[in-house]
Image (tube, rainbow, N blue to C red):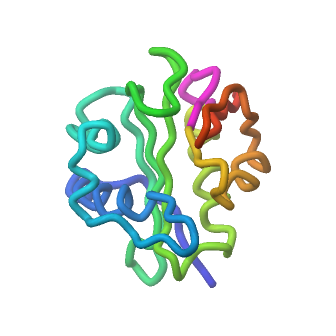
Amino acid sequence: MEYKIRPILKEEYSILEVFLYEAIFVPQGISPPPGSIIYQPELQVYVNGFGTKKDDIGLIAEIDNKPVGAVWVRIMNDYGHIDDDTPSFAISLYKDYRGMGIGTALMKEMLRILKDRGYNQASLAVQKANYAVKMYQKTGFEIVDENEEEYIMLCRL
């Protein structure tokens, strides 16, 4: 399947809310949460005012000119927060496009951009049961901390 990765356009920032919901890991056998969950303050840090800070960077993966995934970073006090110099990742794809290498390509391109812009590292938080842990490790992230449910991962650039 042919896809293209490109910078997110300002008029597309609102789609990050859709991808934020898609990023919520739902273990097998559990019902997905209502869409309104993304309006909780701890999730709004990922999207509220995106594009207003110099550290806000986003990419879209598209197939046939339709967005199928997104990765975005910003320095924020989120689950994966390391410090005020380390951008935190958010990434998701629509379910039908997972497992095809698109997420890995999005991650690698964002890591390249961050390195080119002079960042030393990037972080993320991921639930331990999430299959994406392996993908994050393949792209250079290492587990640096954990709590009962999540790993905090760091990638040195």
With 57 as the anchor, is 40 left or right in this view? left
User: Residue at (66%, 34%) from the top-left corner?
Assistant: 153
Picture quadrant of residue 78: top left
Q: Relative to 80, say whether 60 is above or below.
A: below
With 133 as the anchor, is 28 left or right in this view? left
The image shows residue 54 at horizontal and vertical percentages of 34, 26
The image shows residue 74 at horizontal and vertical percentages of 41, 33
User: Residue at (58%, 56%) from the top-left corner?
Assistant: 106
User: Residue at (49%, 60%) from the top-left corner?
Assistant: 92
| Badge count | 0
Residue 11 shown in magenta:
no
Q: Nearest the camera: 106 or 93?
A: 93
Residue 121 shown in magenta:
yes
The image shows residue 73 at horizontal and vertical percentages of 45, 39
The image shows residue 101 at horizontal and vertical percentages of 68, 68
Q: Relative to 85, say whether 131 is above or below.
A: below
With 52 as the anchor, is 58 left or right in this view? right
The residues colored magenta run 115-124
Q: Relative to 24, say whether 50 is above or below.
A: above
